[in-house]
Image (cartoon, helix red, strand yellow):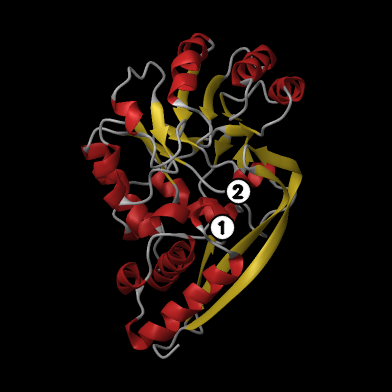
Amino acid sequence: MANGLRLTVVEDVFPVAGTFTISRGSRTEIRVVAATLSDGIHTGRGECVPYARYGETVDGVMEAILGAANDLGDGLDRQGLQDRLAPGAARNALDCAFWDLEAKRAGKPVWQLAGLTAPKPIETAFTLSLGAPESMRDAAAKNAERPLLKVKLGTDDDLGRIEAVRSGAPNSRIIVDANEGWTVEQYLALAPALVRLGVALVEQPLPAGKDDALRQIERVLPVCADESCHDRASLSHLKGKYDAINIKLDKTGGLTEALLMRDAAVAEGFDIMVGCMLGTSLAMAPAFFVAQGAAFADLDGPLLLAADREVPIRYEGSTMQVPDLALWG
């Protein structure tokens, strides 16, 4: 790169612990893209997870990152990046690499550079992947000590699955993720029963782009936008339909937009969830700072993997500790 920085972009593959299943399919490994920026002395890193739901591929994301660097040359910096790349995985990896590099160069942690308060450990949800009710009950029982469970749904027997999870984990709070798999009729039928079972929130019950019906119904079970929510430009379309938004850096295009979006969403009266794609500790670290003070954090990606980065984030049960500076930030 002409501005004295060296950019490296690689694909990394990590095994999942067992199999992770949602309504769209299953996976036994994750393929992520890592971007590294170096000035010869200091190095910054960022990770993204290309997501097919948004038309992203590993090769396409890598090409987008390299293309942005080539096009901007001397003008490539974190602020210029916001206009050069659209919100999405590619911008996320490069934006987070810039933040990490800036912190290393300044000798200050990212939270100070961003004007944030000193971070504290947070409680994350732990995700139970989709399966038969019996297997989901067993998985819930194995994690019954966790304060917050997130349950993947989107089947013809979602109520049976939540009843099974509740029997396995009688004391945990529960949030559910329908992954666009419900109709408005299913929401109306399921919501009162789920509330009685102690479910606190449902993510994206209706398909993105077909969620206007949420304006017309009583949302007895609070509804959180996920696939309908990307960056600040999304917020005007979500008002009146959703009670909360799920901020994911792979959708916002990095930490820069995620922090701005969080503040804008709070000002609009939305509750905040900070979530993740299935990624490593390198992807969770920037999101950790966005999740400070959020109503819900869903940053359990590393807990679902069989291997992680060399300096992983430390989890004590469901409590996520402040990331080590050797990892990021």
Q: Please tell me which residue is depicted at 50% across the width and 18% down the height of the picture.
A: 199
Q: Is residue 195 visible?
A: yes
Question: Identity of the amino acid at label 2?
Answer: Leu
Q: Is residue 122 found left or right of 300 in the rendered image? A: left
Q: Report the front residue among 243 and 5.
A: 243
Picture quadrant of residue 273: top left
Packing grade of label 2 (10 A; few <14, some 14-19, many >=20) is many
Question: Identity of the amino acid at label 1?
Answer: Val
Image height check: is 62 above or below 142? Answer: below
- Percent x, y of residue 4: 43, 88
Q: CA distance from mark 1 to mark 2?
A: 7 Å
- First-in-chain label (1 vs 2): 1
Q: Provide the secondary structure element on which disc 1 rests.
A: loop
Q: Which mark is residue 177?
A: none
Q: Report the front residue among 154 and 44.
A: 154
Image height check: is 98 above or below 118? Answer: below
Q: Is residue 258 found left or right of 181 in the rendered image? A: left
Packing grade of label 1 (10 A; few <14, some 14-19, many >=20) is many
Q: Is residue 242 visible?
A: no
Name the residue beneath numbered marker 2. 278
Q: Which mark is residue 49?
A: 1
Q: Provide the secondary structure element on which disc 2 rests.
A: loop
- Percent x, y of residue 159: 60, 16
Locate the N terminus by quadrant: bottom left
Contact, mark 1 vs mark 2 (Cβ under 8 Å): yes
- Percent x, y of residue 144: 66, 20
